[in-house]
Amino acid sequence: ILTEAEIKIIEGQIRYFYNKKFTANKIVSLPTMKQCGLDMLLTEEMMDLNATADTWESAVRQAGKLLVQAGAVEARYVDKMVHCVKELGPYIIVCPGVALPHARVSDGAKRVAVSYIRLNHGVLFDMDNIKPICMIFAFSAINEKDHLHMLTDLWKIFMDKAALKRLYRCRTSKDVCNFMHKFLA
């Protein structure tokens, strides 16, 4: 929805307020934060494109397991992702067919990371879900800012129905990586 110019303005405002509140020094500039972009974080090892799950909880745990295996989070972080959904409801459903589970930094996050699983058969998070969830992006963050570039990249995909369809149709992890690099370029 936002233009590149609007995004730059918002990012500048975020940097200004962060600097004003937390530090006298400038925070990492956005080009340096590119290392925390989706195309850099979502590697082939962080994906499972043939996942199966009978429940939403199992699906979230599978996405979380990839974060644990990568050393990005402690196992308790995955438990907290599930707990948050049980406590707060399916707030992690960000668009039809897609969920974005996460937990707090203090729940065992070690670094910024993202995993992606595609389910062979979607799962419902509650009875109100009209469309089953078939794509799950689990992420971890270590502070209030370092994951924002990755979330911005995800949102670009979530807001583009054609991009979501292309992403879902990718056959291999390498295809997903290639799609990300081209789409986010």
Image (spheres, rainbow, N blue to C red):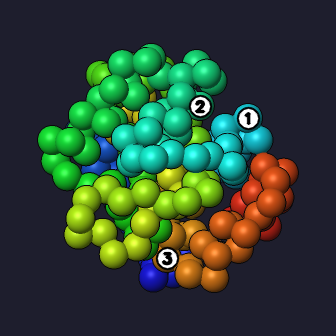
List the single residue furthest toward the front: 54
The residue drawn where x is 49% and y is 61% is 122
Q: Give the spatial CA distance, label 2 vs label 1.
A: 8 Å
Does the rendering let one see residue 5?
no
On the image, numbered disc 3 is attached to which residue?
A: 159
Residue contact at pointers 3 and 1, CB within 8 angstroms:
no
Instruction: Note whether 182 is above or below 135 in the view shown.
Output: below
The percent coordinates of residue 95 (x first, y second) are: 41, 70
Q: Are marks 2 and 1 in contact (CB under 8 Å)?
A: yes
Q: From what the image shows, is residue 25 above or below residue 90?
A: above
- The residue labelled by disc 1 is 45
Mark 2 secondary-structure assignment? helix
Q: Amino acid at mark 1?
A: Glu
For numbered disc 3, what is the local secondary structure? loop
Q: Pointer 2: what residue?
A: 66
Give the spatial CA distance, label 3 vs label 2.
Answer: 25 Å
Q: Nearer the viewer, residue 102 or 86?
A: 86
